[in-house]
Amino acid sequence: MKRCISCGRMVTEFVEFPCPDCKEKIARCNYCRENKNAYKCKCGFEGP
Ligand SMILES: [Zn+2]
Ligand SMILES: [Zn+2]
């Protein structure tokens, strides 16, 4: 289980990828990924 960076829920199905900026691992649930929900990394990077 990981916390989705977009919706903040604990999710079991997610994708993990490095932040384009700080390379920190970001977890995002499939729902947010498919809906292209915005996220904000703790380094300040925002994106889909
Ligand atoms: Zn989510
Ligand atoms: Zn970052």
Image: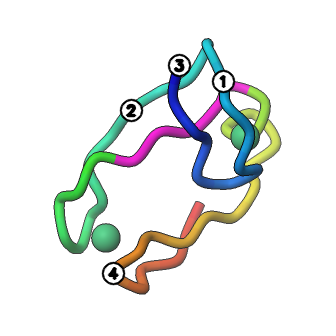
**Chain-order first, disc 2 or disc 1:** 1
Label 2 neighbour load within 10 Å: few <14, some 14-19, many 20+: some
Is 46 magenta? The answer is no
Separation (CA) of disc 3 from disc 4: 22 Å
Q: Pointer 1 and pointer 3: residues touching (CB < 8 Å)?
A: yes
Separation (CA) of disc 2 from disc 1: 12 Å
Q: Is 43 placed above or below 30 here?
A: below
Which residue was labeled with disc 4?
43
- Marking on residue 16: 2
Separation (CA) of disc 2 from disc 4: 17 Å
Where disc 2 sits, the SS reads strand
- Main secondary structure of the magenta stretch: strand
Where disc 4 sits, the SS reads loop
Q: Is 44 placed above or below 35 here?
A: below
Of badges 2 and 3, nearer the viewer stands 3
**Chain-order first, disc 2 or disc 4:** 2
Quarter of the rendering containing residue 22: bottom left
- Marking on residue 1: 3
Name the residue located 75 percent from the left edge and 33 percent from the top edge: 34
Magenta span covers which residues? 26-30
**Chain-order first, disc 3 or disc 4:** 3
Quadrant position of the C terminus in the picture:
bottom right
Lateral position of residue 32 relative to residue 15, left or right: right
For ligand 2, the image quadrant comes to bottom left
Q: Does the residue labelled 1 lie within 8 Å of ligand 1?
A: yes
Q: Pointer 4 and pointer 1: residues touching (CB < 8 Å)?
A: no
Of badges 3 and 4, nearer the viewer stands 3
Where disc 1 sits, the SS reads strand
Amino acid type assigned to the residue bearing label 2 in the image: Glu
